[in-house]
Image (cartoon, rainbow, N blue to C red):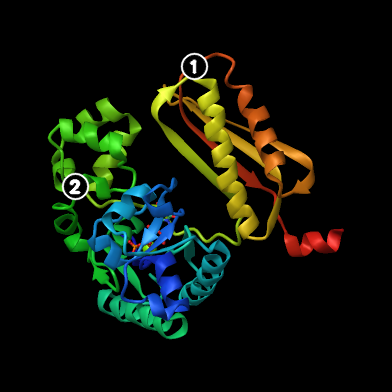
Amino acid sequence: MSQKKRLIFHLDMDHFYTAVEEREHPEIRGKPVIVGADPKEGKGIGVVSTSNYEARKAGVRSGMPISRAWKLSPEAVYLRPNFPLYLKVSAQIMEIIRKYSERFEQWGIDEAYLDVSDKVKDYSEAEALARQIKQEIKEKQNLTCSIGVGPNKLVAKIASDYKKPDGLTVVKEEDVEKFLAPLPARKLLWVGRKTEEKLKALGINTIGDLACYDPAALTAMFGVMGMQMHLNAKGIDKSPVVSRAGIKSISHETTFQEDTADQNAILQTLDELSTDVLEETVSQNLFFKTVTVKIRYENFETHTRSKTLPFMTNRIGDLKKTARELLLTYLRHERKVRLIGVRVSTFVSSEKQKTLF
Ligand code: TTP
Ligand code: MG
């Protein structure tokens, strides 16, 4: 008996922050719109969070310095992010999506996976269901999204990105390898810029190139990741759609451009990560008690260490101080560091906190 076939959706909202802003301010529709740091007439520091498709035509991209966006599109409408609004809309959208299957997994602010294996009998029913979800979101929220349908999360995720905005891409199990083969290897979720360079040096540009490459050679070069790469390139992914009830933790981490033992630089980056984590925590109306730091040395050895405070807090000073204290225990040996991260957990909402006082 063969295992039951799975049918997975991945849904991703189109140009999410700017789409919400356009909905709230119809007068900016049709113009290039950029949400991010203050451009200060080209002298601003900070980056683009996202831009609408009109601004993307001029070459504007998420993560780009805002000063560069200004050069590409000085006529665009520039807005500071309104996180509480985006989080509210995100929660409303997730409410709509999760009705379609109890196997629902939110991923980031504007993405979700749905396992609809028990809800539809084949790909044609799956496609109809995906259309229905798109339509409900359009009617109730006046926003568009793109959905990918496939036999697993990996394929569904790549499919949702395949045609955007307002896309619907269905990849049947038998078409998976054909669909993936011509796409750049970077589309595989774990392929960052560094891995992409290494693969290019081996003559591997597309997912198809990777699928044909000797898996033993990949393993020799990339360790366990090598086997993972081989399987993913063939479109094999067994990871389940994991339902998570509410937010259990908020974390940010970063890989240094070059491995570093510079304590000042590491601690400064740690402070920046703490600031990002706190911003998100506050915007969700949460207080935390537990702080965890993560460190990965250049040889990939990874450690985490936690501390639970004797009080609930949402103050940046408490987070920065605790995170520094925890990380410093790892920085005594002057070993080169590859990655650090900060996480907060053990939450109460501010609503509850108010009643505690
Ligand atoms: P994405 O889904 O990556 O981007 P998007 O929804 O803006 O555009 P697309 O149509 O291509 O899906 O991210 C969702 C939101 O997360 C995005 O609207 C803004 C935010 N974001 C950042 O703040 N910084 C980033 O670097 C990225 C990629 C996203
Ligand atoms: Mg999106």
Q: Position of residue 15 (x, y in %)?
A: 36, 65
Q: Which residue is rendered at x = 49% and y = 16% of the image?
A: 335
Extreme-top residue of the structure: 333
Residue 128 is situated, as x and y percent measured from the top left of the image, at 30, 81
Name the residue located 66 percent from the left edge and 47 percent from the top edge.
Answer: 345
For the point 76% across and 40% down, the residue is 309
In the picture as drawn, the residue positioned furthest to the bottom comes out as 139
Instruction: Left or right? Give the position of 234 relative to 191.
Output: left
Please identify the quarter of the rendering in which residue 87 is found. bottom right
Q: Is residue 150 visible?
A: no
Question: Residue 98 appears at what percent x and percent y?
Answer: 50, 72
Query: Most extreme residue toward the front, as rendered?
Result: 41
Whether residue 196 sits left or right of residue 262 in the image: it is left
Residue on which disc 1 sits: 335
Q: Quadrant of the N terminus?
A: bottom left
Secondary structure at badge 2 equals helix
CA separation in Å, label 1 and label 2: 35 Å
Figure quadrant of residue 75: bottom left
Answer above or below: position of 344 versus 19. Answer: above
Residue receiving disc 2: 207
Residue 287 seen by the camera: yes
